């Protein structure tokens, strides 16, 4: 087990290192000059040259890479090349937004996806099952950005209603406005995950229900409800937990599209703006963060697997 | 394997002939009504895409009527804020969306199959290196990957296709590799090698044809993903550049510029949803028909 953990950790580190090289190179391939973006088109060549020097853009690429890596390893992430703001400060400001969005999305996914998946499996081929399956396949096909757009446009056009969009509301000072701000985006964001968790819970539970020990439980005369909830459900949730873990890993990096549409100042909006404007430092640092969180949660889920399912043993 | 070997040794009159091909097709369809519906949706959309110039009522990118109106008998889906016929734009968008989807998936699947089959067949260092690269690419956050690539290459139809194709390669390669790992242990591969076939020949004439069904299944399920990816990129302004009638693009325009226009956002989105729904249903069905082992992946 320890050997397995060490090997997986080493692999995770290697993957992140590869990703750092890819991002670094990709961002520098195309045109675009952060100094020019920062100073505007009217900047004098001398000024541009000076900014280049300050940013370390004159150094050879490998040196730039090493400097960046050194910063990353010492947790000194530097400044945005565009706005000169400190990346760590900005990150601290934006992280809670993405974090709350993640928590609420996870809540909807678990609270709606699992129960309806169970109902669908328990009442297989009933009208309820068909409704759940129909919703699941539609939920996987409808683009989130379209639903998000409709969620904003329909109330705006019909009743002139809009959620508070232009300011950030704290959960503690004004819970209701905070919910008006985070409720719709988190539900929209949860739509796809709810659908896939429903499907997965259903198929996984159906598979477990075929197991011998379930038949034994039934033969003992237990009610259908007890068999499903006390015997079958726990085992059938193992793959669901994997998917939830991966989902959480993805959401911790923020959601580019939903944050952009609902004007939330989270990490997704941050990295999106940085990529658009070729703000190298911010873009590469945040890509590393997003990938890092995803890789670590992936690893965590794999390791938890052996706890949930003692049949799985690692050599 | 054993079954087909036995069949060749039987005298011909013992070989039972199956029902004709169209009958088998009809039977498969009846057994998978949802898949049949998906196929119907996709075929309809392909026809719409092909005949878009005939089907549209007005030229796109041209003023057609009073801007910002709801659906009428002349403008089926209403008019957008520039006075364009939304119906005509949606119909023309089918062409772009399907073109991007099919090309990106074809490119990505082809590359992924070659890489995966090669890695699985050769094993050793080739396999180890390609596996690590695949791991890395899968760990890379997808939407950021697309954004960075398109930002670097510049938004255009060709670059969107390239970006989506690159995104697809690792997941195809991974599944195909495991199929190739199984395939290479078969006796006929050994036989081919014994008579002096080169690696390239074995790969192209033996391994790839035998794992083709796996490729077909993955590519069908990936088509929906690819079309969603194009729509999302265009929505974010980094996909098909305006004024091309891309569905994602049109939704973004309806949303961001004043006055907001519900109809102009509603219908392109419906079109995207139906397209992706069609491919998802079709993908589920092909998976069940061709390769039950992949179920639930």
Image (cartoon, rainbow, N blue to C red):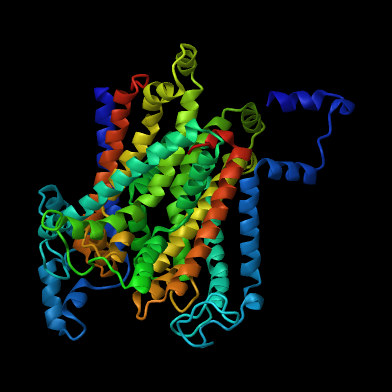
Res. A65 visible in picture: no
Which of the 4 image quarters holds residue B195?
top right
Please, which residue is most extreme toward the right here?
Answer: B13
Q: Residue at x 81, y 24 (%)?
A: B9
Q: Position of residue A232 (x, y in %)?
A: 41, 24
Can you say which quadrant of the picture contains the C terminus of chain A? Answer: top left
The x and y percentages for residue B82 are: 45, 85
Residue A201 x, y percent position in the rendering: 43, 35
Residue A171 seen from this side? yes
Residue B150 versus residue B215 in the image, above or below: below
Position of the N terminus of chain A by quadrant: top left
Q: Nearer the viewer, residue A15 or B288?
A: B288
Q: Is residue B120 above or below residue A138?
A: above
Most foreground residue, B242 or A3: B242
Query: In the displayed structure, would residue B147 be above or below residue A190?
Result: below
Q: Give the camera-side residue of B122 and A120.
A: A120
What's the residue at 34%, 75% (across, down)? B256
Q: Residue at point 53% right, 77% down?
A: B71
| Residue placed furthest toward the top | A220
Q: Residue at left 13%, top 51%?
A: A70
Q: Viewed as shown, does residue A50 lie left or right of A141?
A: left
């Amino acid at each position: 087990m320890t050997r397995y953990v060490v090997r997986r950790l080493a692999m995770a580190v290697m993957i992140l290192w590869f990703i750092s090289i890819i991002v670094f190179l990709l961002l520098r391939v195309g045109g675009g000059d952060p100094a020019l973006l920062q100073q505007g088109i009217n900047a004098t060549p001398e000024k541009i040259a000076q900014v280049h020097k300050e940013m370390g853009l004159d150094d050879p690429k490998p040196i730039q890479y090493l400097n960046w890596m050194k910063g990353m390893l010492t947790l000194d992430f530097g400044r945005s090349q565009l706005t000169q703001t400190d990346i760590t400060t900005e990150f601290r400001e934006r992280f809670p937004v993405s974090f709350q969005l993640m928590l609420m999305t996870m809540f909807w996914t678990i609270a709606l996806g699992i129960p309806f998946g169970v109902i669908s499996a328990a009442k297989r081929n009933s009208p309820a099952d068909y409704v759940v399956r129909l919703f699941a396949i539609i939920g996987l096909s409808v683009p989130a950005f379209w639903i998000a757009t409709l969620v904003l446009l329909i109330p705006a056009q019909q009743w002139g209603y809009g959620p508070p969009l232009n300011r950030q509301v704290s959960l503690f000072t004004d819970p209701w406005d905070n919910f008006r701000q985070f409720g719709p985006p988190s539900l929209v964001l949860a739509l796809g995950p709810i659908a896939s968790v429903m499907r997965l819970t259903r198929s996984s539970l159906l598979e477990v229900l075929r197991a011998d020990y379930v038949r034994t439980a039934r033969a003992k005369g237990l009610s259908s409800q007890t068999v499903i909830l006390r015997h079958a459900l726990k085992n059938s949730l193992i793959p669901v937990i994997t998917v939830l873990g991966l989902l959480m890993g993805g959401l911790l990096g923020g959601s580019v599209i939903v944050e952009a549409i609902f004007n939330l100042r989270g990490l997704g909006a941050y990295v999106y703006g940085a990529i658009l404007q070729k703000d190298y430092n911010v873009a590469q640092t945040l890509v590393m963060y997003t990938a890092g969180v995803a890789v670590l949660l992936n690893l965590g889920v794999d390791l938890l697997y052996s706890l949930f399912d003692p049949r799985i043993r690692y050599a | 394997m054993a079954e087909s070997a036995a069949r060749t040794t039987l005298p011909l009159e013992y070989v039972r002939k199956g029902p004709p091909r169209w009958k088998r097709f009809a039977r498969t369809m009846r057994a998978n009504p949802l898949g049949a519906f998906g196929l119907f949706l996709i075929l309809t959309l392909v026809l719409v895409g092909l005949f878009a110039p005939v089907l549209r009522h007005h030229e796109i990118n041209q003023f057609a009527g009073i801007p910002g109106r709801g659906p009428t008998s002349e403008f089926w889906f209403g008019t957008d804020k520039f006075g364009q016929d939304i119906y005509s734009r949606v119909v023309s968008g089918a062409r772009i969306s399907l073109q991007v989807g099919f090309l990106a998936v074809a490119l990505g699947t082809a590359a992924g199959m070659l890489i995966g089959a090669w890695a699985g067949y050769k094993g050793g260092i080739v396999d180890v290196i390609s596996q690590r690269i695949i791991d890395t690419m899968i760990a890379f956050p997808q939407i950021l990957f697309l954004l960075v690539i398109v930002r670097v290459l510049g938004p255009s139809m060709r670059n969107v296709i390239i970006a989506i194709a690159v995104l697809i390669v690792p997941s195809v390669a991974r599944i195909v590799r495991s199929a190739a790992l199984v395939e290479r242990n078969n006796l006929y591969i050994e036989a081919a090698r014994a008579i002096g076939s080169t690696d390239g020949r074995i790969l192209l004439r033996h391994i790839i044809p035998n794992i083709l069904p796996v490729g077909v299944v993955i590519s069908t399920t990936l088509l929906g993903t690819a079309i969603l990816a194009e729509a999302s990129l265009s929505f974010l302004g980094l996909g098909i550049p305006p004024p091309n009638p891309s569905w994602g693009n049109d939704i973004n325009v309806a949303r961001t510029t004043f006055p907001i226009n519900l109809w102009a956002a509603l219908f392109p989105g419906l079109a995207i949803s139906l397209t992706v729904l069609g491919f998802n249903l079709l993908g589920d069905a092909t998976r069940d028909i061709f390769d039950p082992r992949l179920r639930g992946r």
